[in-house]
Amino acid sequence: MVVATENLQAWSVTALTSLIKNKLEIEFPSVTVLGEVSNCKQQQTGHWYFTLKDEYAQISVVMFRTDATSLAFIPQNGDKVIVEGALNVYPPGGRYQIVIRKMQKQGLGELLLRLEALKKMIHQRGWFKKEFKKPLPFLPKRIGVVTSPTGAVIQDIIHALTRRGGGGFNLILNPVKVQGEGSAQEIAQAIKFFNERLPVDVIIIGRGGGSLEDLWSFNEEIVAEAIFHSKIPTICAVGHETDHTIAEYVADMRASTPTAAAEMVMAEKLQQQKHLNQLQKQCQQALVYHVRTWMQKMDECRSAVDRSLRQRIQHLKLKLAGYRKALEARDPRLRLKHLRQLLVDWGRSFDRLIYGRMVLQRQRLKGIQQTLQAIDPAHLLKKGFSILFAEKDGSVITNGEKVHSGDKVRIRLAKGNLKATIDRVEL
Amino acid sequence: MKEKHPETAEQQQLSFESAFLRLEELLEKLNSPETPLEEALKYYEEADKLITLCGKRLNDAEKRIEKLIKNRNGEVLVDESGSPKTEPFSLP
């Protein structure tokens, strides 16, 4: 805004600054500047402030915290850096500055440029193409490792192989330098060595994490070439945070860590093992099922046999009981018993009958006895009668005509005998 | 590394594949309710043997960790027969 004074037209400071701000910021929305860091300090807020200078000029630089977190290094005075950002005018301070979004060390910048160029070249050669990737062998047993013998990489690989693979592998370490001068040549040579002299099943090429400079040998053309021409499948495991190295792109497989590389080697084996275990389990289950089915069938048969047997037995039992009853009814002992009873009954009747008759006879006998008693001569003798016997022949004399006087006789009394002589016979 | 590699990876893969094919076949027979028990037992025995064999194959190589011996110039040393020299490597 222009205000009129006595005779001159003048800008307000704000207006001029605002104009400058617009002009500059629109003109330089994105600049890349090379310079040396000085007056470098980081505020508590996390923002970085420093001056970028060269021989003849300097410019203020600010890097806000959100952008500063992605810095790969801590800027120090004297660092030659390339910054990328936008020009910005700060009206309260009357200053212009660059608000930067990215900053890298100058050397690194060159490296990155070289990396990009290399990538492009190798890409053009087609070495990154999928069609060149070899599959890992079926069950790698001999594992070549190209790495430092002292680093964590070889330890991680051995641990992972032992843990996951449970033995059953032959590891051959080809010890190499993994950084510094000559390291790329050593790595490339080691890969060639395995191919030409010691045919292993797979080669793991690895190193731990580091800065772009540290990892540089893995970006070298000679290494890429050795990997590409390797007939043995390769796994490349280079620790890093962001970009991959060229070696990883060219290798058949890329592993994020050495442990992951070892696991890739063992993956098929574990898979097969799993498959085997599964098959074994299934076979066992199938067999158990079979046996169970047959056992069940057997049980069914058994109970069916049991049932029919029981039924038959029951049937026979009933039949037997019927026979027994019939038999019992026809038991001769029963008849005998019956007859015996009959006999007893008859016997009793006879007894009764005979007894009656006996009583009767006994009474008759008694009557006869009495009669006989009454006519017994002895009895008569007692009553006063006597018997006369002829002496000459002992005969009883009942007729007087047969006796003659003078005959000798014997007279029998109840008690004693008398001898007499007949005096006279009276007829 | 004087001994020869007993089987190439390709041969191994083939023998595994045929073993698995046979195993699948056996499993199918085992699963069939028509298979008589006696035969099922035979099939199971065969499957068990095959599984044991494959398992042994998976783990047959003995664990060996070696390091190539190099001279100061970084060249691998070789023995009289021209084989690269190795030494056992153990973790520090």
Image (cartoon, coloured by chain):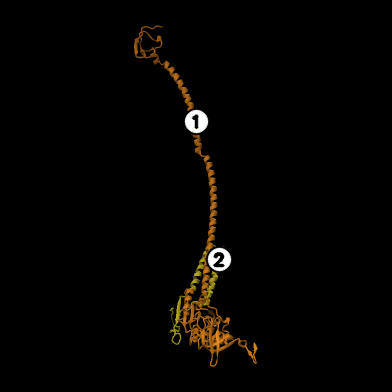
| Mark 1 and mark 2 residues within 8 Å of each other at the beta carbon | no
Amino acid under disc 1: Trp
At x 52%, y 41%, the residue is: A327
The shade of chain A is orange
Viewer-proximal residue among B33 and B73:
B73
Mark 1 Cα shell of 10 Å, populated few (<14), some (14-19), many (≥20): few
Amino acid under disc 2: Lys
Rendered location of residue A405, percent (x, y) = 36, 8
Residue A12 placement, left or right of B85: right
- Chain ID, yellow in image: B
Q: Is residue A21 visible?
A: no
Helix, strand or loop at label 1? It is helix
Q: Which residue is mark 2?
A: B29
- How much space separates mark 1 and mark 2, taking CA atoms? 90 Å
Q: In the rendering, which numbered label is found on residue A91?
A: none
Identity of the residue furthest to the bottom in this view:
A56
Q: Which residue is mark 1?
A: A346
At x 43%, y 18%, the residue is: A370
